[in-house]
Image (cartoon, rainbow, N blue to C red):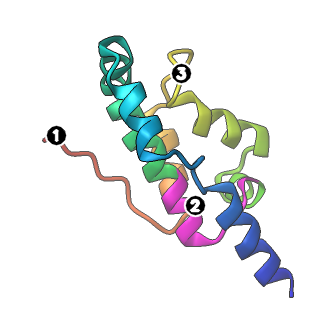
Amino acid sequence: MAKSRLTRELAEKFNPVSHTAEDDARLFADPKFRDAYDALEEEFTALNALLEARKEAGLTQAQIAARMGTTASAVSRLETSLSSEKHSPSFATLRKYAAACGKKLVISFA
């Protein structure tokens, strides 16, 4: 029972806010919006990779934190740091996060 609740909570947590095609067209018609959106592509890609790894592992931030030897609030800061310019996580931290999810950190350039 607890597992199905956790699965449901994870699914709810990672569902994006729905937008209509009209919403997207209106927003992307503004060159300033489009430029700002495009500038964040790498951050969103990295954040999505973290969240997907945790989702695939079926783990909460607290469980990831326990595996990393840190706190849930530190994991929360790590996940949100990729969408802000306040802090850039180290490779060591990203490696620990990946390992906690049963993954391996791989960085590539396109």
Q: Is residue 61 above or below residue 86?
A: below
Residue 86 horizontal/vertical position (percent): 56, 15
Q: Which residue lies at the image location 69% right of the left edge and 40% below the top edge?
A: 76
Assign the magenta stretch its main secondary structure.
helix
Of the residues under marks 1 and 2, which one precedes in the sequence?
2
Residue 107 horizontal/vertical position (percent): 27, 46
In the image, the segment drawn in magenta is 51-61
- Extreme residue in the bottom direction: 1
1 and 2 marks in contact (CB < 8 Å): no
Where disc 1 sits, the SS reads: loop
Of residues 81 and 101, the one drawn nearer to the viewer in this rendering: 81
| Residue at which label 3 appears | 84
Of the residues under marks 3 and 1, which one precedes in the sequence?
3
Gap between marks 2 and 3 measured at Cα: 20 Å
The question of residue 71 being in magenta is answered with no
| Residue at which label 2 appears | 54
13 sits left or right of 93 in the view: right
Residue type (three-letter) at the residue carrying disc 1: Phe
